[in-house]
Amino acid sequence: MVARRRVLGAGLAIGGTGFTGVSLLPVINARDASAAASQPAAAPVVTPFSRPMPLVPVLSPVSTSGGVDRYEVTMRAVSKEILPGLTTDLLTFDGHFPGPTIKARRGRPVVIRQRNETAVDTSVHLHGASVPQNSDGGPMDVIAPGAERVYTYPNRQRSASLWYHDHAHHVESENVYRGLHGSYLLSDPDEAALPLPKDDYDVLIGIRDAHFDTTTGQLIYTMSDRARSTILVNGAPYPYFEVAARKYRLRFANTSNQRFVELGLEDGSDMIQIASDGGLLPEPHTTKTVYLSSGERADVVIDFARYPVGTKIVLKNTAGFGPVEEVGQVMRFDVVRTADDPSSVPSTLRTLPQLPQPTAERTVVLRMDEDGRVDPNGYIDEKLYDPERVDARIRFGASEIWTVTNANTKASHNFHLHLVQFRVLERAGAAPGPAESGLKDTVVLKPGETVKLQMTFDRYRGTYVYHCHMLDHSAMGMMATMKIC
């Protein structure tokens, strides 16, 4: 693992020669990669708001017989134009960047045959989903180049904006960075009955950052790179999106490796948050900004009827590191027409069940080396990830309270469990805010911060991981294993 981290930390770039698999990593020219990684973060060769926001395609099943939606997906390397006039080598699901959206329905299983035609090992994890161990996409359950694997998703949980991404052992960070991520939208009849914006007015907005060699157009990968300062929305840098003067449901997803974002409209107007990672909140939350760490999602409703046709409103980011002119703007909404609007946001969105009496409590401490060493490690409870070790044994049916602490003084982390959604009970000793009032699967921890979470393990037995979802940190070893039995 140490050898792999050293290679990851050396500064990786992909040239025009494609991908090959040695130690699960693309082989590159180290001298050229180091030179590229040492470049300062130059302003991207793109004029902001000059390109329309791509709408991520929805994948169609190859079969719907027997009450099961079946899909066939191929992971493969492709080249696409992201920066104007340049092509970028990517790892993709079905050739799309980001991967295609899968729309699923509660109670109707989805079966996906994933074929790996890349030159690196992969593993597909449906983030936020409750699935059997053999379909969870664990770090060691890899698909070798040229092989395939069938994943079955029962979809027994309630509606939520989920996403899927690579999770191969210690290379998930680079594989996701190079494009192996997509969205999975789970609906149910209760949500469909609400008068929320629907169809063309229900829009996925996936946000992530990237570091490009602006001469060649290639992505530069370096562990914990703070020069990832080009913001991409649905795969395009700083796009515009034409909207009607009416309400929209916008499904924000932060698919960055480690960047946090705080999203707000440049004029300070209100947004109404209606959902988080695990689906609808109990009631809507009016806010000026939405804060998302890597892997978190939030659905908001924005009413563009308050703006006259012709208005252009920038979606800003006021969090994180990097030049304001690059990371401080995300995209622009252009109000281009009027439209009828039968939608509304009800005062009650979802009733969550009462939390059961907890049966056990445990503590988890996240920490990484932050003393400037060349090859830092990440730890959970002062241990590096070891796939042969079980770190937490949990009784099936147990409802546990986990107290999770970020022991670092400089570095932020976040925390994600596979298999279960949880409720946030406390943040820094106080009740959580309304944005964390619903079901969650990923939670942010700033330096020195502690959160209390409660989750119930009553769905599947098996072995699953929990980790920091700043993927560069989990690739450094900040991951552990739980066994439910």
Image (spheres, grey):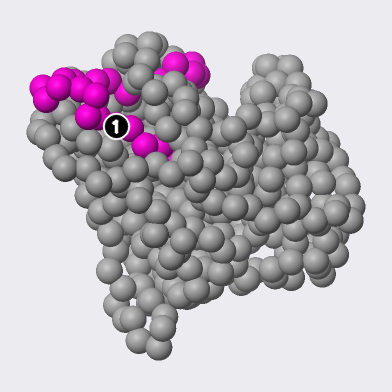
Density class for disc 1 (Cα within 10 Å; few <14, some 14-19, many ≥20) is some
Q: Position of residue 101 (x, y in %)?
A: 34, 56
In this view, the residue in front, 470 or 262, is: 262
- The image quarter containing residue 338 is top left
For the N terminus, which image quadrant?
Answer: top right
Q: Which residue is mark 1?
A: 303
Asked if residue 115 is positioned above or below residue 293 in the image, the reply reads below
For the C terminus, which image quadrant?
Answer: bottom right
Give the farthest residue toward the top. 324
Asked if residue 148 is positioned above or below residue 215 in the image, the reply reads below
Stretch of the chain drawn in magenta = 298-321
In this view, the residue in front, 302 or 464, is: 302
Residue in the picture at 65% in, 59% down? 419
Residue in the picture at 35% in, 51% down? 195
Amino acid bearing label 1:
Asp
Q: Secondary structure at mark 1?
A: strand
Q: Position of residue 385 (x, y in %)?
A: 74, 47
| Number of numbered callouts drawn | 1
Residue in the picture at 24% in, 20% down? 313
Q: Position of residue 402 (x, y in %)?
A: 80, 44
